[in-house]
Image (spheres, rainbow, N blue to C red):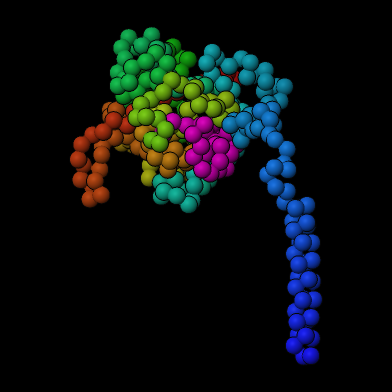
Amino acid sequence: MRFYKILITFSLLFLLSACGDKAEDQASEEIHPSFSQLPEASEESSPLPDQRVVPVQLSPEDKAKAEKAPEGMVFIKGGCFIMGNDYTQEDEKPEHEVCLDDFYLDKYEVTQERWEKVMGFNPSKFVGANLPVEQVNFLDVQKFIEKSGGTCRLPTEAEWEYAARGGATTRYYWGNMVHEDYTWYVDNSAETTHPVGSKAANQYGLYDMMGNVWEWVNDWYEPYYKMRSKNNPQGPETGESKVVRGGAFDSSAGALRITSRVWLHPKNKVFPKVTTYGQIMNEVFNYVGFRCAQSLPH
């Protein structure tokens, strides 16, 4: 008799458990429908690669300034931002507030076609009219600027970083992880430069701010930022090396970070390759180019 009571008890418990599992399954189906129940995504509903970057919105007054931008340049609305990074390399410290006036900046890195028209020769290793000019040192760029008749100057380091950010506070202007829709770098470049503008633009409509070729800026390099001026800083008055920004097609993801800084002597076109022991082994091509800036007339 006792055996039958135990058997009935277990049978009742099993039935109750089965009913509970069925109820949970029904609730789960309501909350988490299967993939077959989800609506199919259409091309119109699928996010485009550049939807992670929202273009900067301009006021009517600033739109008028943007419409007056020199050919090939975009209007960069001035403002204040936090420059540098306290959590990465030592020379990116300290974070500090910088305020800039409005300026214009080239939409693309200077191409070989543009360089040849002004300078009459092409120093680049990878040759192509729409490829960015590279293998140019700081002094070469100054000659280009002189021959450009006041239509070109190098951006300051602060201007470059501000423009590259596009208002973003992440590692890159598109987020915190490398995304191949926005840059040519070591993992996707096939070891060569590419035509300017081949990847998606940033919030200001600037192309190749990260990758393709490094870019000279006007500031002398110093191993940490000194706050001489909050407004339109120009960097130190003298130095041994100039600042180079932005990374190149052969750079790692780390070199592409907005705040990453590199220095190079004004006469050099390539960086020295250094071993872990600090011994200079040989020079390697690290493809340095530039883009022009202009100040707005007062």
Q: Nearer the viewer, residue 137 or 114?
A: 114
Determine whether 152 is above or below 275 in the image: above
Q: Give the quadrant of residue 123.
A: top left
Tell me: 31 left or right of 261.
right
> Which residue is depicted at the point 54% across and 13% down?
71
Determine whether 7 is above or below 284 in the image: below
Query: On the rendered image, what quadrant is the N terminus found in?
Result: bottom right
Image coordinates for residue 79, horizontal then vertical, percent: 61, 34
Tell me: 42 left or right of 86.
right
Determine whether 54 is above or below 26 in the image: above
> Which residue is depicted at the point 50% across and 26% down?
199
Tell me: 279 left or right of 127.
left
* Magenta segment includes 84: no
Image coordinates for residue 266, horizontal then vertical, percent: 31, 29
The residue sitting at the bottom extreme is 2
Determine whether 289 is above or below 30 in the image: above
Q: Give the quadrant of residue 21.
A: bottom right
Q: How many marks?
A: 0
Q: What span is in magenta?
A: 159-185
* Magenta segment includes 169: yes
Q: Nearer the viewer, residue 54 or 43?
A: 43
> Which residue is depicted at the point 73% across and 43% down?
37
Image coordinates for residue 150, horizontal then vertical, percent: 46, 14
The answer to whether residue 219 shows anywhere in this view is no
Q: Nearer the viewer, residue 273 or 41?
A: 41
The answer to whether residue 108 shows anywhere in this view is yes
